[in-house]
Image (tube, rainbow, N blue to C red):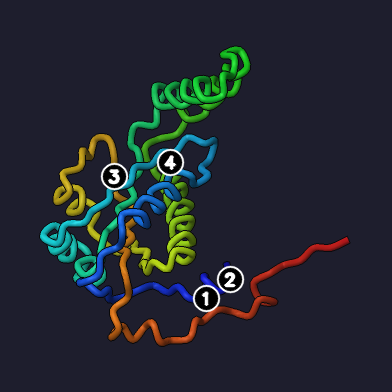
Amino acid sequence: MLKALNWRYATKSFDDKKLLPEEKILNLKRAFNLTPTSYGLQPLKLVVLSDKTVQEKLYKASFNQEQVKTASHVFVLCVEKNIDQLFIENHFELVKQTRRTPDEVLKPFRDFLIEDFSKKNSKQLKEWATNQAYLAIGNMLTVCALEKVDACPMEGFDAKSYASILGLNTSKIEPVLVMPVGYRAQNDEFSKFKKVRRPLEDVIIEINN
């Protein structure tokens, strides 16, 4: 695991002649779906793109960051915008069907969440959902490292342009993170740089008996 994490880096240029096999893409989709989220609500959608014409358009909406157009695939992580009573009820219905949990057991927690989320405004809901997207992209980056798939997590892009280019229904979902994936280009100088991290003793606080 640690060897894989040391191998990975934020890839700046991909070999645009090499495509990821579908099995690796499927594993990344599964990693996204298996990501732990707050309350298990999964307020996320994942757009999976492998179209060079569209990627060229996204490149311009990504402040000309090359990895978007040279990647084998581009993952766009989106947050749900309608995290309301129906959304929560649908989640608990899925729990009920999957685990055969009696409704009377689920009701107190379901009612608590409905009340709690009803108090949040749209900005607070987006912030909460975006935090879950960061959990997902972290999970996916780890799987990329284990699968020897190169990737680059990105925040720098025009979300409105992305939504327009991808034809997303912005009343329902909003792009918040982007992750191009593929195989690093041989001339990507960043692949040769040593990883820079603070010493372990500077970032770890231990509290012992």
Residue under label 2, please give it. 2
**Is residue 183 visible to the viewer in this orientation of the structure?**
yes
Viewer-nearest residue: 174 or 3: 3
**Residue in view at x 45 percent, y 50 percent:** 31
Give left or right: position of 144 versus 80: right
Give left or right: position of 52 versus 143: left
Q: Secondary structure at mark 4?
A: helix
Q: Pick the quarter of the image with the N terminus.
A: bottom right
Comes first in the chain, label 2 or label 4: 2
Circle 4: is it few (<14), some (14-19), or many (20+) Cα within 10 Å?
Answer: few
Comes first in the chain, label 1 or label 3: 1
Residue under label 4, please give it. 124
Between marks 4 and 1, how big is the CA–CA gap? 35 Å
State yes or no: discs 1 and 3 in contact (Cβ < 8 Å): no
Q: Pick the quarter of the image with the C terminus.
A: bottom right
**Residue in view at x 34 percent, y 63 percent:** 154
181 above or below 117? below
Residue under label 3, please give it. 174
- Amino acid found under the numbered disc labelled 4: Gln
Give left or right: position of 207 versus 120: right
